[in-house]
Image (tube, rainbow, N blue to C red):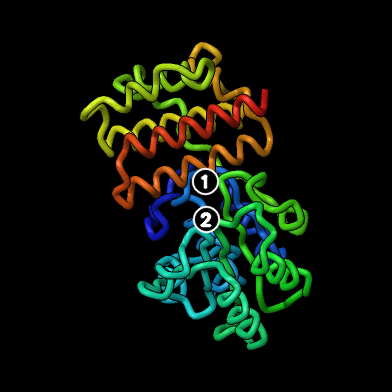
Amino acid sequence: MNTLLPAIAHAAFDRLKAVLNNLGTAPPQVLLLEGGSEAQRMDTARYWAARINCPTAGTTGAPCLSCPSCHQIAAGEHLDLAAYDGRISNREDEENPGIIRAFNMERVRELKVRLRDAPHGQGRRVVLLMGLSLTRDEASNALLKALEEPSNTTVFVLLAPQREQLLPTLVSRSFCLTLPWPDCHADDPEMHPWEDALAQFLVQGQGFLDKVAGKGAIDAGGATRLLLCCQKAMSRIISGRHDPARPLDAALTALHGKSRAMACQWFAEAQEALNYGVNPARVLEALSTRLFTLRRMAG
């Protein structure tokens, strides 16, 4: 088994890779990848970039995943691969520039200049875009204009947990593929009391805030596990496999459409706050309060 792109190396992704291989003969200008985990979406996007840039893929119909081009793409370092993330702040982008840059107006201007040049290799330039919001700002408007201009040298890939988290105008321009959902039924029995407390709060508005406020009640690791429980519950709901007997599933099923997309975005933001060392109790208090309000509005 080739483990160059480990997040999608198992058999569950064979069908998806076969679809991408077929698409490689006539690549859509905009591909939208939804579902799966963040790592799986990224590896799938890089597999797609390899499919249309691997020197042997035109003959074999699939990337070799062993040549220098494929290795550079897998590492995010290929000259014809660019990646932008709307969750990266401008300050972070300037102070610690990495292979994934912030999605802002300055970067969009640089990208539009770059798109005028031919790709460095014989394939096509691939632009990955993630962390985009539903806000129609200046950068989003500029991106939409770029997508409206057909190109034989550049393709775009949008990455999102759900297509509902993106502007409808972006989705309408995209060829959409849904990745296999993560194992959303894997259980964490030690978190059941926390799941139940959060579910009760979402329905009744009581109990959870006092529980998290207790001294040493939950650390960053526990908060991360609870967030994962929330994400799994939402995955079950979105994929139509939720369990009404599970209190958290039952509480979150009241959310629909954009409300679900917003909740998923909040889960990601809460995890990011934990990664930056924000007090776990404060993170969970803010998240639960937002979810409670959102559920009331949805009801």
In the displayed structure image, the side of residue 86 where residue 151 appears, left or right: right
Three-letter amino acid code at the position of disc 1: Phe
Foreground of the two, 176 or 295: 295
Q: Residues within 10 Å of mark 1 (few under 14, many from 20)?
A: some
Is 293 located above or below residue 104 in the figure? above
| Total numbered circles | 2
- Residue 114 — which label? none
Q: Residues within 10 Å of mark 2 (few under 14, many from 20)?
A: many
* Image coordinates for residue 31, horizontal then vertical, percent: 66, 59
| Separation of residues labelled 1 and 2 (CA atoms) | 9 Å
* Image coordinates for residue 77, horizontal then vertical, percent: 43, 74
Tell which tag, 1 or 2, sits nearer the viewer: 2
Foreground of the two, 118 or 59: 118
- Residue 44 — which label? 2
* Image coordinates for residue 133, horizontal then vertical, percent: 61, 54
Task: Tell me which corner region of the image, top left, top right, bottom left or bottom right, holds residue 196.
Answer: top left
Please name the residue that numbered disc 1 is placed on: 13
In the displayed structure image, the side of residue 258 where residue 6 appears, left or right: left
Residue 67 seen anywhere in this rendered image of the structure = no
- The residue located at (61%, 58%) in the rendering is 158
Is 292 located above or below residue 165 in the figure? above
The reply to whether discs 1 and 2 touch (Cβ–Cβ < 8 Å) is yes
- The residue located at (47%, 16%) in the rendering is 200
Q: Secondary structure at mark 1?
A: helix
Residue at the extreme top: 245
Residue 192 seen anywhere in this rendered image of the structure = yes
Instruction: Check the picture and name the quadrant holding the C terminus.
Output: top right
Is 275 located above or below residue 113 in the figure? above
Three-letter amino acid code at the position of disc 2: Thr
Q: Secondary structure at mark 2?
A: helix
